[in-house]
Amino acid sequence: MSDRTLVICKPDAVGRGLVGEIVGRVERKGLRLVAAQLRTIDEATAGRHYAEHQGKPFYGDLVAFITRGPALLMVVEGPEAYKVVRTLMGSTNPRDAAPGTIRGDLAIELTENLVHGSDSPESAAREIGIFFPDLG
């Protein structure tokens, strides 16, 4: 069974020229790119995306970071796609991420960890609906 999930190459990945590396890793793993768009996420959309973090001390920083420049938004498809992407990304804190993962190989800072991937099928459906409503 093929599932879909959302992947975001965050503004730090775009700024550092790492989008090709990240997309390449996703594709080499066997996931298929279904949709992609390079765009700067506006504050309202970021607020919907990070709704579960509203009211937390780091919420403002999350929104400021994801909206600071262009991000590559992607929908990828494959068996248990969200699990595959989460494994490829590595731990949220890049200093704890294993070598061979995107964050383990390419990032150092928790606040600049290059990539987002949905954490469950339910999150994937919600996030795809936010960024790619025509695919919902």
Image: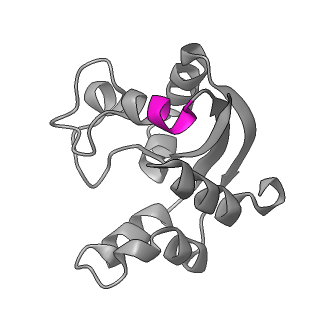
82 to the left or right of 94: right
Residue 21 x, y percent position in the rendering: 51, 24
Vertical placement of residue 43 versus 68, above or below: below
Give the extent of the magenta segment.
80-85
Of residues 20 and 125, the one drawn nearer to the viewer in this rendering? 125
- Compared across the picture, whether 50 is left or right of 125 comes to left
**Quadrant containing the C terminus in the rendered view:** bottom right
- In this rendering, position of residue 37 left or right of residue 112: right
Where in the figure is residue 23, as x and y percent of width and height? 58, 28
The picture quadrant where one finds residue 4 is: top right
> Which quarter of the figure has residue 20?
top right
Q: Which residue is drawn at 55% across and 25% down?
A: 26
Examine the image and state in which quarter residue 1 appears. top right
Against 61, is 98 above or below? above
Asked if residue 8 lies in the magenta stretch, the reply is no
Total residue callouts: 0
Q: How far across and down, in percent of the image, does residue 30 sit?
A: 61, 17
81 in magenta: yes
